[in-house]
Image (spheres, helix red, strand yellow):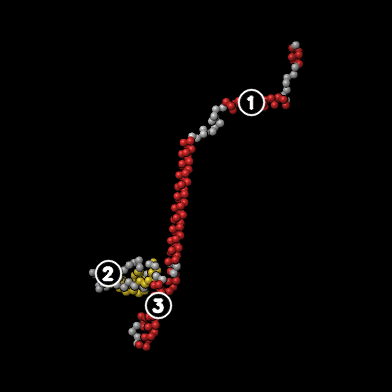
Amino acid sequence: MAENEQNIPESEPGEGGNQRQAAEAAAYADTAASTQPEGADGGSEEPTPEALMAALENDLNAARDAALRAQADAQNIKRRAEQDVEKARKFALESFCKELLPVVDNMERALAVTAGHDESVKPIIDGLELTLKSFVDALRKFHIEPIDPEGQPFDPQLHQAMSLVENADVEPNTVIAVMQKGYTLNARLVRPAMVMVSKAPTGE
């Protein structure tokens, strides 16, 4: 009997053994999965309805704020664009105006030189005066106004002081002579007036 038991060969692993081991492993995995408590796979518990509502409200508030900011930015851009267009329309003639001003200056100088001459040049003077008047009227039509501040207090925003002269007959810091008129375009300074300004006599 013992001899017979010694002659019984042990079962060698083969294809049948591998299948049996695989089936046992699968059954063990199914058993472990069925007995594993919820949440044991490392994931967090499902959020409560209150937490979901709070998260949704936060997202809604963030989206509302972003929409309001985008609307405000769009309005600011529109306003700036309108202002730029308005400035471009109002001051488009600024460069052209600067080119015309020397012509007006020369005509005024010509009239100043011819003042006091005899009657032979009076027709020329009259023609110059009419031409200058037409020129100034055309400038005013496009809101180009002269600055002629003689007798007025000195204003550094509109006037450029070329010299200071002692004068006891007027208040100090008064424009006593205009060497070149200034001009504005739509109330914006194009060229300051070059002036002579009074100051108190020495010792007073």
Q: Secondary structure at mark 3?
A: helix
User: Can you identify the residue that label 1 sits on?
Assistant: 27
Residue 76's spot in the image, x, y percent? Answer: 44, 56
User: Can you identify the residue that label 2 sits on?
Assistant: 172
Q: What separation in Å lies between label 3 and label 1 (alpha carbons)?
A: 110 Å
Whether residue 75 is visible here, answered yes or no, is yes
Under mark 2, the amino acid is Pro
Under mark 3, the amino acid is Ser
Closer to the camera: disc 2 or disc 3?
A: 3
The one nearer the camera, 156 or 41, is: 41
Q: Secondary structure at mark 1?
A: helix
Sequence-first disc among 3 and 1: 1
Residue 52's spot in the image, x, y percent? Answer: 48, 38
Q: How many numbered markers are drawn? A: 3
Q: What crowding class fits label 1: few (fewer than 14 Cα within 10 Å), some (14-19), or many (20 or more)?
A: few
User: Can you identify the residue that label 3 sits on?
Assistant: 134
Residue at horizontal 46 percent and vertical 39 percent from the top: 54
Residue at horizontal 36 percent and vertical 85 percent from the top: 122
Q: With 85 as the anchor, is 178 left or right in this view? A: left
Q: Give the quarter of the figure containing the C terminus.
A: bottom left
The one nearer the camera, 12 or 38, is: 38
